[in-house]
Image: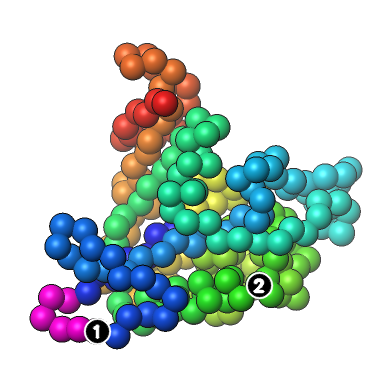
Amino acid sequence: MAVIRVLSDDQQPALTPGLTRRTYQNRNFEAFTISWLPHDFDKNPNLCVFEGFGARLFPTWNKCPISVGRDFKLDETIKLAVNVKNAVCMWGPYEITKVAFDLTVKRLGLLDAGTIKYRADDRLTREKRTAINCFHAMAGLEELFPNGGIFGTGFKMWGINGTARVLIEYKVRGTKMGLLLEPVDEKKDRYGFVYAPTRDGRPLYDPFKRASAYRR
């Protein structure tokens, strides 16, 4: 999740601690990304999700370890996807209130503090506030941690589907709380980037109705 605060031209607002003022086409802004993964995921991308008989049904049977977490930057996250030729999905941008921006900054600070670790299957560690996965890292921003619900089941909640569920939560709860300033449609707003093996070839995998192709 990329969060951007565009700074007004006629004022000199106080910058957010920990963020850097940047400029694009003569506009000043602050920006950061919430992309929560194991700290060494760029060197060791073999993520352990479920390991052991019955691990999907019984969280206590899951032998996957807890990892030190790291919030990857946007360019680092996109590079991870491009390196393995993954399809990349994008929604938005959506305008939000300052309250919503402040909540995302608070979540960023929580992740960067080093007290929270990473685990893909966080059914046992989420409520204890010891480890969370990438979706819970950006979900439930008005709370310290969401209490689970459909996010806790693990069923079809990975990749594009999982991110779409987070966006649905934003739409429902964010609209109710007045955090979103424009409508969100998680299906119609979806746009993708898919890998194509050749310049004129068909993409290997295209789960989108609208997409652009990329190749290295």
Q: Is residue 126 visible to us here?
A: no
Q: Which mark is residue 71?
A: none
- Against 50, residue 181 (above or below) is below
Q: Is residue 190 left or right of residue 160?
A: left
Report the number of discs. 2
Residue 19 or residue 90, whichever sits in front:
19
Q: Which mark is residue 13?
A: 1
Residue 186 at x, y percent in the picture = 38, 52
Q: Is residue 96 visible to us here?
A: yes
SS at circle 2:
loop
**Residue 9 on the magenta span:** yes
How did the renderer colour the structure? rainbow
Looking at the figure, which quarter contains the N terminus? bottom left
Q: Residues within 10 Å of mark 1 (few under 14, many from 20)?
A: few
Residue 101 at x, y percent in the picture = 37, 75
- Against 71, residue 162 (above or below) is above
Q: Is residue 55 left or right of residue 39?
A: right
In the image, the segment drawn in magenta is 8-13
Which residue does the image show at 15% across and 57% down from the upper left?
25
Residue where numbered disc 2 is placed: 114
Whole-angstrom CA distance, mark 2 to mark 1, is: 29 Å
For the residue marked with disc 1, what is the amino acid? Pro
Q: Main secondary structure of the magenta part?
A: loop
Q: Is residue 185 left or right of residue 163?
A: left
Residue that lies at the very extreme toward the left in this rendered image: 10
